[in-house]
Image: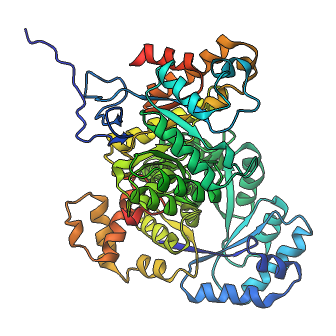
Amino acid sequence: MILIGEDLNVMSGEISRVIKEREPGPIQQCVAAQTKNGMDYLDVNVGPVKKDPEGTMEWLINTVQEVTDLPLCLDTTNPLAMEAGLKFCKSKALLNSASGATESMETMLPLAAKYSADVVLSVINDAGLPSDADERAASIMESAAVANELGIANENIWVDPVLLPIGVDQRQVTSYLEFIQMLQDLLPGAKSTCGLSNLSYGAPKELKSLLNRTFLVMIGRYGQHSAIVSGFDRELIRLIRGEVPEMVELIYRAMDEENMDISALPQKELEYVKTVQVLMGKSLYSHSWLEV
Amino acid sequence: MMKYEPPLEKISVNIRETVVGHGEKALKIGGENTLPFHFFEGSLPNPPGLALEILDTEPENWAPSVLEPFEDVVSDPVKWAKKCVEVFGAEMLCLRLLSADPMGKNGSAEEAAEITKIVADAVDVPLIVWGTDMEEKDAQVLTQVARACSGKNLLLAPLVKGNYEEIAKAAMEHGHAIVAQASMDANLTKELNIALCKFFPPEKIVIDPTASALGYGLEYTFSIIEEIKQFGLADKDKMMQMPILCDFGGDCWRTKEAKENREQGILWEAITGITFILAGANLLILRHPEALKLIKEMVV
């Protein structure tokens, strides 16, 4: 599983401020820490960068690359900032993101082709977010065909099925699971990614990681290639890196709905099993899903 | 030749049966093990409960045609209650404690409890007691009501995330049922029920998904009721197996159509009510006696 660290993000007020004031310290600290924690890529989320997109990106990408050799995942909605960023990346970058919406395909896909970058392609299109797995399939087939025509091979496309918060729409979570199992038949060779933290948006703070990491193990089993995750979530990293194989095994067994004596499980194991059940849509989600 | 037998879906669990009131006139709601009107698949032992609402204060801004049936009694909640029972045949009442509303008269919790006690003693039908819809005030008002009417098995409403603990504890101590309210969201409904069931008996909980009348988003309410019922019955989710209440008279009689024309108003309310029963509602709070009559003719 390729892990993309999400923490360099202008949504954090502090990061936003230090970018504006060209203060490299906190940025480099964030980058170095995520690198040390074992991320494979680093997401650089700069938002729309309305002011001086070229200058900002040049400074930021260079600042980041001074302390890490990891490839970067450039996350901006501004094509000018995106192009500036791509120019300064030392290793093959990941453009985050394009979607099936006409405007995005017309601006972002040609950039990915021009700079031979990999590209995150989401299932969103002009009609918005598809409501189930089949609609996701139809949407991604159309946009991938456009990308292919521009010379972007399936192997360079990182499909984003779009993960919604489980507290907002549990059915979207189950249709994600359904879709990710179909992906290799639809687009052989294509990669995949998702914004994992979105899953637990709105959930109790202390339970977010449990939802995120359990889901990541589940989709990993279904062939998920990568995910954008918190580079500081140690439990997630340990689980995904195979340091707790017995828990991964347990998650698989819960996915298979194997008969288990739930009452005999220790607390931690029980929590994973219950979490798998809500993520699979077997029981209705509520913030206190562990207490039932 | 073999006779064709249509397959039937057998559901192995029931919606809990909740009793409101005490004595001979106590009413049971819920208890079904199938979807609404699916008599061919399972049993629905109790018809939907239909309550008429009364206020503890003279109503302001009520449309003339919904005020008309009560004109001679609105100044006295006891007379109002008796008229609903004796003249309009109400088998359940909902007393709204408007007098305690912090945005209005802001009467004390003790006064509200006193009025409730007087009304509850005057009639023998079950009573829903509706607070002010203000979290903090309801915590005071409904706990006082619970105490004053100990043993009467009132249905106290609404309990929300911010005040359920105090009210439910008082309800339990004094033998009342409660309405758990979460706004149009199955996940939050479950959340509140889980929290309540840690100490409160589940068979004394009624769910209020906050109903919106025709023209206010009825279709959302419909879907939420359906969803809750499906989770409870098909998925056997114990936290979703409580009967469902809908309260929408205020919405209906605020519409231009209802204000302008008596028949339109009555139909507006009756159609809204019938629709919710079709979705799976177990208890309706109604404002106009003619709407009550229409619904009764259709379903009971």
The quarter of the displayed image where residue A97 is located: bottom right
Residue B143: percent from left, percent from top: 52, 57
Residue A69: percent from left, percent from top: 65, 85
Does residue A75 appear anywhere in the picture?
yes
Count of numbered circles on the image: 0
The quarter of the displayed image where residue A24 is located: bottom right
Foreground of the two, A187 or A101: A101
Residue A201: percent from left, percent from top: 59, 63
Above or below, A196 relative to A173: below
Foreground of the two, A263 or A94: A263
Q: Quadrant of the C terminus of chain A?
A: bottom left
Does residue A137 appear anywhere in the picture?
no
Foreground of the two, B273 or A65: B273
Above or below, B69 relative to A170: above
Above or below, B56 relative to B90: below
Residue B270: percent from left, percent from top: 55, 19
Q: Residue at x 76, y 15 (%)?
A: B260
Colouring scheme, one of rainbow, by chain, secondary structure, one colour: rainbow
Foreground of the two, B15 or A197: B15
Above or below, A23 relative to A227: below
Q: Residue furthest right?
A: A52
Q: Residue furthest left?
A: B1
The quarter of the displayed image where residue B256 is located: top right
